Amino acid sequence: MKYLVTGGAGFIGHNVVRFLEELGHECLVVDSNTNYGFIPREEMDYLLEARCKRFTSTVRHVDIRDGGMLPTLFMVFKPDCVIHLASFPRQKVVGEDPLTASDVMSTGLVNLLEMSKKFNVKKFVYISSSMVYGDFETDVTEVTQCSPIGQYGIMKLMGEHLVEDYSRQGHFAHVIIRPSAVYGEWDVEDRVVSKFMTKAMRGETLKVNGANEVLDFTYVEDTAMGITLAATKDCANGNIYNITRSDTRLWTLKEAAELAISIAGQGTLELADRDLSFPKRGRLDITRAVNDLGYAPKVSVEEGFQRYYNWYLANPVLYKRNN
């Protein structure tokens, strides 16, 4: 099978490409290599170069908003499946530049859907987010009503509807994936776990907005394997899947920060009120993914945090860069 993976040089995407290659599939990576206007360029360049060394597939530096470039890629590569990971990465980034975010998450998506329709792609895998649910607490299934809070979740849910509509018209099969709180090696620093870990390793103060807020922390390779399973199994077609750790032991933000401090052996805590611009989140139910796909997340939060710490030790240019 041939897979065109947008955002394939990204944090999650490059792991998906690695897993597809291990299964013997051919991939074409489409990635704009953007730093979203706020990630330090030296950090982004270091990560992109390192990620691309972890797979052998060809990388094309293309902005999915550029409808002029995509037809050539589709015509030459002839993908059987598109896995669409390229997006503004989270709510904070969307809120700082909603116009560009909308362009990427809407225009870029429609460009890909139209190319998939025109070039007879068999399957379209759309990576959405747990943020489409809005406020939730625990054991949320894929049939739970979505009530997103904030532009990121709203745009992700809109994307789901667009993909479903193209599929309804018979252009291709589709799968929708809803990950949550992904963390791990080769990520940028501007996310919850990466902030906690790097600040702890520098002996700085870890600010926790909402000590008792919980997240379904999921190790990146578990997320990538869930996406790979959904992309390669026909039984997934037409379905939505929560792809998370879904551990019975949920971690609060305070506990996650304390774990980072414990592993690093330094750092202090500062507790603040919950950030009301983000919805309350809990555990997602992954029964459907377990039963349909054989999805089995392997890495506990304790093990994942330790791996992350060890990786930073091996890449000191990242966690030491602000010293």
Image (cartoon, rainbow, N blue to C red):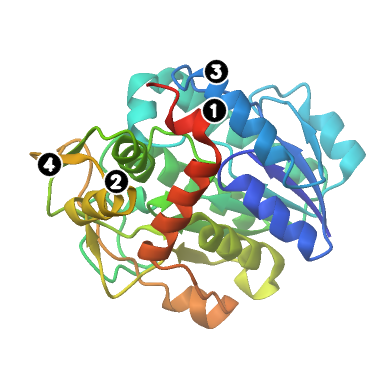
Labels 1 and 4 touching (C-beta < 8 A): no
Residue type indicated by callout 1: Val
- Give how far apart the Cα atoms at labels 1 and 4 are: 29 Å
Residue 93 position, x and y percent, is 38, 27
Residue type indicated by callout 4: Arg
Corner quadrant of residue 225: bottom right
Q: Residue furthest bottom?
A: 291
Residue type indicated by callout 3: Arg
Question: Which mark is in front, 4 or 2?
Answer: 4
Label 1 or label 4, whichever comes before in sequence order: 1
Residue type indicated by callout 2: Pro
Residue 321 position, x and y percent, is 45, 23
In this picture, residue 206 sits left or right of residue 65:
left
Residue at the spot 69% in from the left edge and 22% down from the top edge: 66
Per the image, the residue denoted by label 1 is: 104
Label 3 or label 2, whichever comes before in sequence order: 3
Quarter holding the C terminus? Answer: top left
Q: Is residue 40 above or below residue 301?
A: above
Residue 173 position, x and y percent, is 67, 60
Q: Point out which mark residue 41 bears.
A: 3
Is residue 291 visible in this depiction of the protein? yes
Per the image, the residue denoted by label 2 is: 148
In this picture, residue 136 sits left or right of residue 210:
right
Q: Residue furthest right?
A: 76
The answer to which of 63 and 18 lies nearer the viewer is 18
- Give how far apart the Cα atoms at labels 3 and 2 are: 31 Å
Q: Point out which mark residue 274 bears.
A: 4
Q: Is residue 267 above or below residue 102?
A: below
The answer to which of 69 and 213 lies nearer the viewer is 213
Is residue 171 visible in this depiction of the protein? no
